[in-house]
């Protein structure tokens, strides 16, 4: 079982926004949708533009699930399974997360 | 089989319309078509002739789409007059000696202005008002004149007076009858119109019989002598004393002529020669001729159908009209003078607002016979439908003309009560059923309906009705018509704006809890973020609202395709000092930024890493720059020319005004981006008419244009007000911008906003200029508050350490994004393509 890698303090992320973390050479987007101690991690690269921008998208709710809308062309990616609302041809990888003692940890 | 030869004499509005309709219906393989066009240009819009002075190009008035005639192989003989017709040989001979044979001939020779025999009317200071050439001559004379008079106070005369006013000369109107527009208005209506026209500075003289024009005067070049012994001194004279059918050629060729002139036609629009048709103002049907364009269009249709062997008859025409003369709304329907025996009238007069409305109803009070509307034509289309379709009037017909506040509940004629055959658009003869069919065929927006049916693309008077009809048909089809911004809020942007303002809501979560549901999305979040910023002008990045904004608002720059940002400092009016320019250059050099002059008269630096933005901006701010809000839905910039500061043609300080306006409105969040333009003279080098708001200098102030647009769907701005002084201009502008901020839907440019605004530009003028809604004080206060709260967002961001932390690419590392790679281009750089990146592949290839 892979290890939990510490990333940053939970409070370093503003409510309703995302950040990008460099974890073992990988760019990972981490989102904090609300006040709740809950974060989501997906690949930071937008598969459409091949640019590292997803952490800078707006978190949104559709079909009672949370997504992030790419800041470039607004395609939406599911924060839990990485699927894309606009196309079933593309998806992004997702990662397990937890908040432990005020710190965010990610499992690759 | 040889082609049938079709010849049309005359290429005015009706002649061209005939060709358009023919092209649409006929198999063009079977016809060869030739049109004579005596004027030096093909058909143009004579109805809106006076706009030539405000917009000033013949191209804009043209009715012929570029390449239309070429595409359909139609030969148009421009500048060539038909001299005679040999009806035996079926040949038209032109003044150049050309002979054109025909199988079928269509006369569309129109009318000519009739000038009464007044001594001195041949002077070179006397004009008529019919063609673009006439207008050019009037304009040239107006330039060396102080005053002008229009003889004739009818519909066209008042149009002409509007043109003189626009040319900036002292304007007079002379009318023989005791009232203006005696054809269309009753006495009291004419009186109200006169008051309104006089209040804008046009001098009206009624009951005057002009007897002589003497080419001298004490204060002007000419003196008009009237029968009552009085006189008037003016520099030039425009005659608008009626039109006569242009039937000279037909008389000479022996066609039957109507008793009051005009080529006699039957119900098929056929003349006394079965191979010759006549349509439009040159034709006489049942001894009547029609000086409006709509009946002419109808005749064109009938003639096309009959030539193609289809059945169609001309059944006369309704002469009702709704127009705007010298800024005054005027409407006339049916028996406006109440000449029907035993008819009864209802009259509403508001001298305060200069509104006069009268309806004339039948003896039994059940049907509408006529109406006169001055100063307010809102009820015109409803009344016209009552008249045309014989719909039974409500029990109290006066409710149709009473204003809503007068107690009478507004009885609106529901579109459902109209019969399927009801004509909705009279310019293009579009019926209710045509629109219903178009909706059923999937055209679900006003734009789509306009494209499909042409309804509303002529005078535009029917647009409110078309919109109602569209909505009613949509709901019949079960298509829900709503303007909710998204699934999380069952409100339009305008409604949310009011809720936020009235309840003093300051955060998204508060609004969501009270009026929304769920979590929110990429549509409602930025919309609400923008409204909050417009309403409270608070720092856009307060931590509460951070997650609402698109990345360009959060990082105060536009994200480019590779995830880097652009840096665009404000250069008000396009002005920049050499010193500031060199500071900008040194920053660009230091960070190796791609540098380009934008379309908005300023300089953009591209390719900045997010993490470098604070450093870049602190250097720029130290050099005196501030943010250009190029990333925001806000006023971007005011484009200006150098005006009378430098330019030898300039008449006002356009650059000074540009700088002032840009500084006044910078930073204000608007439903979409806004651009202004200011031109220092009529040459319009700043393209102000293509901007959301444009000002064009005149000798005495500024003409204001609104709701223009470049971009995907270019639109020229509408002339909103003329000769404004600075104070009035700023008032109008404050109100206009705030009204747009309050009422537009999300991401709606001013052009689309206006097109969807019920009542269009006239309604907008009533709100902004006449304070129809009584909100102008509030709008001005809101704007003053917003202006007072302006702060440079970059300056604020740089002073907040917490905010600065967000700019690093990684939350846990100082590295840059190594996926951002550039390739050299023309001594600068551009983002590398994906195949140019992939460093691992490169290494492998080198090893092989």
Image (cartoon, coloured by chain):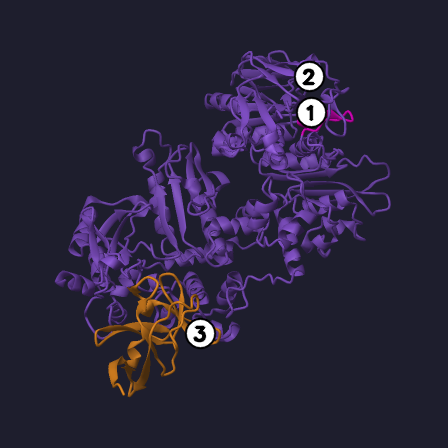
Chain colours: A orange, B purple
Which class describes the residues within 10 Å of circle 2: few (<14), some (14-19), or many (20+)? many
Q: Nearer the viewer, residue B504 or B292?
A: B292
Q: CA distance from mark 1 to mark 2?
A: 10 Å
Quadrant (top left, top right, bottom left, bottom right) of the N terminus of chain A: bottom left
For marks 1 and 2 on the same chain, the one whose residue lies earlier in the sequence: 2
Asked if the residue under mark 2 is in contact with the one under mark 1, i.e. CB atoms within 8 Å, the reply is yes
Which class describes the residues within 10 Å of circle 1: few (<14), some (14-19), or many (20+)? many
Query: Is residue B158 something one can see in this rendering?
Result: no
B168 sits left or right of B5 in the view: left
- Frontmost of labels 1 and 3 is 1
Residue located beneath label 2 in the image: B250
Relative image position of residue A34 (x, y in whole percent): 39, 78
B796 sits left or right of B464 in the view: left
Residue found at x 71% / y 33%: B184
Relative image position of residue B774 (x, y in whole percent): 56, 54
| Label annotation for residue B509 | 3
- Would you identify the image quadrant in which residue B334 lies? top right
Q: What's drawn in magenta, residue-wise?
A: B278-291
Q: CA distance from mark 1 to mark 3?
A: 69 Å
The image shows residue A48, relative to residue B569, as above or below, that is below
Hey, which residue is sitting farthest left in the picture?
Answer: B847
B220 sits left or right of A96 in the view: right
Quadrant (top left, top right, bottom left, bottom right) of the C terminus of chain A: bottom left
Relative image position of residue A36 (x, y in whole percent): 38, 82
| Label annotation for residue A63 | none
User: Could you confirm whether marks 3 and 2 are on the same chain?
Assistant: yes
Which chain's residue wears label 3?
A: B
Which chain's residue wears label 1?
A: B
Relative image position of residue B31 (x, y in whole percent): 61, 28
């Amino acid at each position: 079982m892979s290890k939990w890698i510490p990333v940053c303090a939970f409070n370093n992320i503003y409510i309703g926004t995302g950040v990008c973390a460099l974890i073992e050479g990988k760019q990972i987007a981490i989102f904090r949708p609300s006040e709740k101690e809950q974060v989501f991690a997906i690949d930071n690269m937008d598969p459409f533009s091949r640019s590292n921008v997803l952490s800078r998208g707006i978190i949104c709710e559709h079909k009672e699930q949370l997504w992030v809308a790419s800041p470039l062309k607004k395609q939406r990616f599911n924060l839990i399974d990485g699927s894309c609302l606009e196309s079933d041809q593309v998806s992004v990888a997702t990662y397990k997360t937890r908040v432990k003692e005020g710190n965010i940890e990610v499992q690759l | 089989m040889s082609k049938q030869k079709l010849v049309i004499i005359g290429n005015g509005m009706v002649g061209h319309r005939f060709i358009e309709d023919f092209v649409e219906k006929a198999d063009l393989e079977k016809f060869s078509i030739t049109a004579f066009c005596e004027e030096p240009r093909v058909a143009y819009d004579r109805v809106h002739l006076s706009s030539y002075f405000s917009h000033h190009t013949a191209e804009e008035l043209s009715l012929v789409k570029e390449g239309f005639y070429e595409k359909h192989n139609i030969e148009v003989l421009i500048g060539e007059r038909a001299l005679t017709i040999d009806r035996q040989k079926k040949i038209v001979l032109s003044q150049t000696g050309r002979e054109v044979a025909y199988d079928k001939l269509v006369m569309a020779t129109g009318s000519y202005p009739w000038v009464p025999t007044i001594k001195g009317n041949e002077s070179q200071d006397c004009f008529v008002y019919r063609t673009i050439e006439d207008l050019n001559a009037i304009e040239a004379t107006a330039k060396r004149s102080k005053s002008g008079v229009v003889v004739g106070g009818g519909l066209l005369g008042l149009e002409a007076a509007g043109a003189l006013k626009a040319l900036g000369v002292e304007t007079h109107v002379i009318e023989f009858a005791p009232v203006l527009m005696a054809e269309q208005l009753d006495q009291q209506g004419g009186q109200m119109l006169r008051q309104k026209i006089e209040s804008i500075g046009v001098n009206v003289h009624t009951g005057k019989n002009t007897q002589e024009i003497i080419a001298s005067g004490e204060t002007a070049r000419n003196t008009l002598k009237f029968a009552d012994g009085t006189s008037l001194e003016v520099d030039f004279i425009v005659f608008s004393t009626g039109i006569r059918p242009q039937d000279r050629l037909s008389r000479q060729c022996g066609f039957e002529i109507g008793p009051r002139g005009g080529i006699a036609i039957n119900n098929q629009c056929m003349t006394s020669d079965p191979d010759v048709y006549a349509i439009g103002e040159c034709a006489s049907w049942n001894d009547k001729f029609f000086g409006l364009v709509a009946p002419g269009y109808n005749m064109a249709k009938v003639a096309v159908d009959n030539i193609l062997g289809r059945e169609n008859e001309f059944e006369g025409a309704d002469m009702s009209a709704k127009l705007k003369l010298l800024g005054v709304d005027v409407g006339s329907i049916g028996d406006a003078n109440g000449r029907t025996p035993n008819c009864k009238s209802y009259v509403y007069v508001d001298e305060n607002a200069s509104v006069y409305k009268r309806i004339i109803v039948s003896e039994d009070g059940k049907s509408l016979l006529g109406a006169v509307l001055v100063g307010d034509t809102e009820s015109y289309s409803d009344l016209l439908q009552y008249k045309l379709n014989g719909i039974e009037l409500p029990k109290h017909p006066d409710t149709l003309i009473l204003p809503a506040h007068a107690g009478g509940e507004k009885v609106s004629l529901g579109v459902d009560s109209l019969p399927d055959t009801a004509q909705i658009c009279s310019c293009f003869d579009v019926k209710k059923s045509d629109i219903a069919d178009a909706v059923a065929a999937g055209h679900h927006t006003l734009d789509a309906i306009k494209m499909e049916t042409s309804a509303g693309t002529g005078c535009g008077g029917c647009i409110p009705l078309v919109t109602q009809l569209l909505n009613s048909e949509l709901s019949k089809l079960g298509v829900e018509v709503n303007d909710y911004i998204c699934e999380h809020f069952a409100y339009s942007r305008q409604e949310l704006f009011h809720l936020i303002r009235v309840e003093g809501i300051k955060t998204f979560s508060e609004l969501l809890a009270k009026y929304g549901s769920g979590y929110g999305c990429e549509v409602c979040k930025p919309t609400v973020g923008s409204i909050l910023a417009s309403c409270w002008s608070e720092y856009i990045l307060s931590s509460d609202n951070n997650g609402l904004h698109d990345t360009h608002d959060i990082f105060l720059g536009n994200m480019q395709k590779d995830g880097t940002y652009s840096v665009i400092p404000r250069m008000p009016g396009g002005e920049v000092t050499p010193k500031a320019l060199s500071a900008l250059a040194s920053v660009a050099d230091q960070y190796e930024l791609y540098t380009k002059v934008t379309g908005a008269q300023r300089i953009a630096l591209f390719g900045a890493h997010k993490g470098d933005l604070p450093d870049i901006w602190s250097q720029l701010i130290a050099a005196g720059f501030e943010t250009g809000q190029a990333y925001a839905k806000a006023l971007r910039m005011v484009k200006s020319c150098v005006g009378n500061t430098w330019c030898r043609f300039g008449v006002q300080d356009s650059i000074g005004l540009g700088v002032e306006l840009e500084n006044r409105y910078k930073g204000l969040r608007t439903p979409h981006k806004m651009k202004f333009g200011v031109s220092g003279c009529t040459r319009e080098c700043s393209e102000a008419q293509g901007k959301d708001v444009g000002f064009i200098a005149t000798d005495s102030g500024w003409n204001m244009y609104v709701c223009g647009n470049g971009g995907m769907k270019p639109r020229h701005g509408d002339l909103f007000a003329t000769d404004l002084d600075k104070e009035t201009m700023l008032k109008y502008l404050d109100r206009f911008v705030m009204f747009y901020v309050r009422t537009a839907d999300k991401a709606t440019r001013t052009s689309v906003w206006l097109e969807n605004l019920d009542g269009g530009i006239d309604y907008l003028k009533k709100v902004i200029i006449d304070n129809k809604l009584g909100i102008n004080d509030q709008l001005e206060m809101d704007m003053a508050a917003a202006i007072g709260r302006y702060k440079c967002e970059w300056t604020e961001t740089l002073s907040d350490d917490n905010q600065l932390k967000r700019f690093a690419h990684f939350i846990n590392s100082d590295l840059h994004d190594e996926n951002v790679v550039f390739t050299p281009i023309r001594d600068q750089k551009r983002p590398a393509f994906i195949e140019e990146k992939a460093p691992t592949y490169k290494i492998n290839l080198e090893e092989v």
